[in-house]
Amino acid sequence: MEATHLIEIPVTVEIPVGPQHPALHEPLLLKLYADGERIIKVDVMTGYNHRGVEKLAEKNSFYRDIFIVGRVCGICNTVHANCYVRALEYILGVDPPPRAKYLRVLAMELERIHSHMLILAVTAELAGYETLFMYLMRDREYIMKSKEILTGQRVMADYMMVGGVRRDLDEVKASRILDIVKRVEERIRYYHRVFQEDVTINRRLRDAGRIKHADALAHSLVGPVARGSGVKTDVRVQDKYDAYGDIPFNVITEDYGDSYARAMVRFGELYESINMVKYILTHLPQGNPVPDEKRLPRRFPVDESYAVVEAPRGELTYYVSSSGSDKPYRVKIRTPSLNNIVNSAFAYVDQMIADVPIILGSFDPCISCMERAVITDLRRGLKYRVPLKALGGVKK
Amino acid sequence: MKPALIKEVIKGIFAKPATIQYPKERTSIEPDFRGRQYADLKKCIGCSLCAVECPANAITMVKVPDEYVVPKTNARKIYPVVNYFRCVFCYRCVTVCPTSAYLITNEYRLASSAPIDSSELSLSTTTKVKAGDVQ
């Protein structure tokens, strides 16, 4: 029998990355559709880690919620607590003393330092550079120690309280934190040089997941991701909450918008945060920053408030509605990660599969389905594409 | 461009390890680290405020066993028992206590296969009733 059609089936594979994956740090499913090595489309599927925190916040009192919302995220727990506490302060009309505001900024900037160091370390790890990961994480431990000196615990600070902070900082502790930060600054300068000079990092990060300025705006990306694309957005400058209005710092932006630019934004912010920490420790106002938690009002007036904070990952907002009881009527949390991850699926398109680990994480390839086939009509020399299921109806 | 980390790695081979061999070697902990806390029964008035305010529902109010001395201020003769497996060590109980009855430590080594709570530590803060005394 004479052959009439040549059927080529390109392997357009669907590669699920996650939700359980040894290299991915969060239960997130990325469905990659790849044509050969090139990614055509990415579906981002979230919702594997739903814990009902907003509902839990409605069921608990205003003060219990301070500790509950701090546990939304381990890395940015002080910013979550700060945002919620400020929303409560707006309802109550409380203004914390200047020293408390400075100490809050100190805790949040220490958190930004260790968060950025973590993500830079993870970037190095995903680029296959585990040595750099280990060195960065070793030096991040000093910042965790300084957070322990300030707040009493390495990770879960539980530092924010309505009307101030929960513990004061004495001279000895302040000088210890200053020493640690100065030591870490030297190390960060070194790692910055490594990121700039190292051949592995440069080859893996450059041009990976480029987001143009217009795209970053159109998809309303926030935080270092937007700043890496040249969008000058920073809630610390726009809102000047707590002591950010008094403390000098710059907003770091990079123009190119690839993974390398985002890493460089984080390095720039590390320097800014370190300078802010140094400024705070040398310009700490006097006064008592610790409110008496026994004397805080139990019931809140009928009101609603909206607070916004620049978390290490971008703009974090809290909306708190009070119906006049001791429990909030509604707490709405809008986190930067959801915004950035769900809206940035376009950044993977046209990248190589090998670049996906850099853009988000590693992957576990598995051929799930083949989407389309190419049919060549050998007699007429025509090529056309049909859906795979239409192959059953190809006429001989 | 060059592999920039090589010098550091060679230095690292001869340096002291950065890791701590826990539990052989203890982690250095601040004296005011938020560790295990328990109520001092000499001060506790049994008001249950800590149990109400606990964000993790880790505290239950339990009757003080009859053989222990309870101050007159604790009329209901109850005391808080902290379940350390549930506790998140936020120290809200410590800060809301109206009589500052909580004793704080920086003890962080709380791994255990059996459930652990603060009842034994709290009861050790008070004395047993002597024979013949009436409470």
Image (cartoon, rainbow, N blue to C red):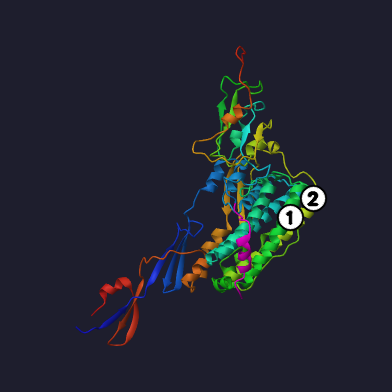
Q: Which amino acid type is marked by label 2?
A: Pro
Q: In the image, residue A173 lies at what x, y percent?
A: 74, 48
* Viewer-proximal residue among B77 and A121: A121
Q: In the image, residue A40 lies at what x, y percent?
A: 45, 72
- The label nearer to you, 2 versus 1, is 1
What residue do we see at 64% from left, 27% from top? Answer: B125
Mark 1 lies on a secondary structure that is helix
Q: Which residues are magenta?
A: B1-19
Q: Quadrant of residue A123?
A: bottom right
- According to the image, label 1 marks what residue? A179
Quadrant of image for the C terminus of chain B: top right
Q: Which amino acid type is marked by label 1?
A: Asp
Quadrant of image for the N terminus of chain B: bottom right
- According to the image, label 2 marks what residue? A285
Decide: is B116 above or below A41.
Answer: above
Decide: is A252 above or below B85.
Answer: below
Residue B7 seen in the current view: yes
Q: Is residue B7 magenta?
A: yes
